[in-house]
Image: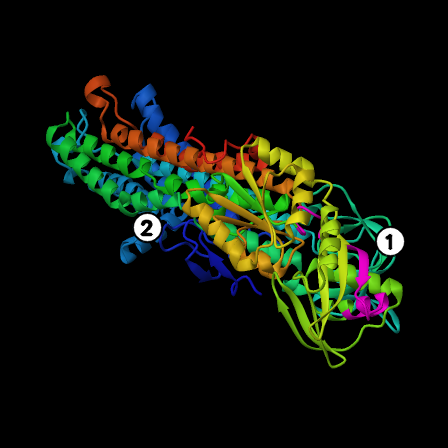
Amino acid sequence: MAEADALYTCPMHPEVQNRGPGSCPDCGMALEPLRPTAAEDTSELDAMRRRFWVSLALTLPVFALAMGEMVLGPDVLPPLPWVQALLTTPVVLWCAAPFFARGARSLRTGLLNMFTLISLGIGAAYAASVLAVVLPGAFPASFRTAGGEAPVYFEAAAVITTLVLLGQVLELRARRRTGAALRLLLAGAPARALRITDAGEEDVCLHHVAIGDRLRIRPGDSVPVDGCVVDGRSAVDESTVSGEPMPVAKEPGDRVLAGTLNGRGSLVIEAQQVGDETLLARIIALVAEAQRSQAPIQRLADRVAAVFVPAVLGVAGVTFAVWAGFGPEPRLTHALVAAIAVLIIACPCALGLATPMSITVAAGRGARQGLLFRDAAAIERLCAVDTLVVDKTGTLTEGRPRLTDVLPAPGFTRDEVLALAASVERHSEHPLANALLETAREAGSALRPVEEFTAQPGRGVTARVDGRQVELGNAPVGATDRSRTAEALRAEGKTVVFLRVDGRAAGTLAVADPVKETTPAAVASLRRAGLRIVMLTGDAETTAAAVARELGIDEVVAGVLPDAKAEMIRRLRTAGHRVAMVGDGVNDAPALAEADVGIAMGTGADVALEASDLTLASGDLTGLERARRLSAATVRNVRQNLFFAFVYNTLGVPVAAGALYPLLGWMLNPMWGAAAMSLSSVSVIANALRLQSGSEAEPAPPSGVYPSTL
């Protein structure tokens, strides 16, 4: 898509969308691409940089003339007002043109913003100075200096313009850094692929790769699509997606992801997801959406910003009136200087940027660590969670069960039980299905055609096979001795499923799903952090208890259906707990949606990812503690930004209005106000950028305790 046709949005007002670059009608800020691209758009930064250097070159002699008169006296260095006017005019009319355009737009639309104040301040200083040069006699005595001259403020208009341009350049450069994480992800996806055809291999554009194509991944190449290895062995660096630095061994049957980096081996893969359907593309879209979202903590800033600019205009008017009526001579000169200082220093930009910049940086930082937040609200809520509810299969365990036992009922054979079970599970997404299918393939069992397949999350599956009704699930049917056998298997930590054919017990199957290597340490870390951990699973109580004992989890709720999982979450929240739910399957989706923060494993089902607020791309719980630290650091960072922005304006406006004059005889020069205004926005962004360099490594706060302001 051409740049002129691409959608652009505002970092402070994500609801604003415009075709092509431009400025936000609400706040006047430069718009950013709505859909991130690997090629960085620096047109706005380049334009501001050009204007800044021209403005600086013209401003320095104007400043020297003005200061020379004050320091050396007019006899040594005359002010040369006409020279100042000639040098300042291009500064105001060309270098400051974007400010006037945005300020005029704000007045037309009634959406007053920082550029309303900046354009009024620069315009007032320049217009008064031009009038003083062209028609000096038009000024009353109260507006003249002790020597009888009409004062000029060309240096104020020029210096303010230069400082605001410098602030814009620094701000745009800092904002560019906030998108570095997304550009890094985008850079990991190659634009071309090596497709294998009957005629050999051909280098093709990635847009021409279709599902089912076979692609060769050479050593050192990035994987272009999501797919399955069909030939070759290698180690693949998946850090861009999962955040884990250790390469992952790949062999035939293993899944590979777009944007990951192949090691020394050569692989042939079959494309399964291409284009926007790849996990990398979904991650990029998710992170971009999270960066544009607004956190609940932003509401206070939004309410203040809505009345801030009109209030500042009112304060500037009152300041002018008070100085004009009661100030020392020349009263109107002091009044104009004070009013301009108020307009310039009271920039609401820092207030508006306080939350969006922190959220943008945090979402990007999380993406690099495999922590994919859905929106800003999820980042804010996670650090306040005090109760963690976890599913078992695929969350605490590997989710890759191995079939260990096949016990046929009288009248059935082992091969028959295995073939029927594998046939119906072929259409299921449940992790147990893979264990049955893998064992059936190894045993050479012939899978049979299936009709009328139905999956009941939390219960099992049913289908017609060779005209017979086949059911496979966790509800036991049959003699008591078979139930005792099932309990013995469960006591070993195995999951037991029962096969029925035409309503008759046909066999019992058991699978073992080992606990992930990283789970014990992760659970221990979360417990040390003060989280209450509850295992919530549809598996049998005996099996769940065995896994819980291994991990040191005291609270176990087993044998629950999906709706019961959601009800359990609802009860915990009603009791006053802030609950996070971690799961990976279809049956976890209702509970994930019900929780304060739903957390999905990146290796889980799509519907679980869609229902979640946070996705752990690595597929294990070690990422959760990192996510909590990042959440706590982000909320702390936002509060610091808001605190600084409020304090800056609370102190800056009265000082600019002349509150210190009765005590110290001192007034704020508008030039210093411009410098302070520019630095306020840059400081907020600089503070947000600290999240990029590891601030989230600080310990998370005790559960349920929000980070303090400072």
Residue 530: where, in percent of width, then height?
Answer: 54, 32
Do we see residue 89 in this rendering? no
Residue 147 found in image quarter: top left
Give the magenta range: 393-420
Q: Is residue 464 above or below residue 479?
A: below
Tag 1: residue type?
Arg
**From the viewer's perspective, is 466 left or right of 570?**
right
In front of the other: 576 or 170:
576
The answer to whether 454 is drawn above or below residue 220 in the figure is below
**Image-based side of 26 in relation to 547, left or right:** left
Q: What residue is shown at x 30% (from left), y 29% (from top)?
A: 651
Q: Is residue 136 magenta?
A: no
Mark sitting on residue 313: none
Taking depth in this image into account, of 607 and 467 the one nearest to the observer is 467
| Residue holding disc 2 | 103
The residue sitting at the left extreme is 325
Q: Which residue is mark 1?
A: 233
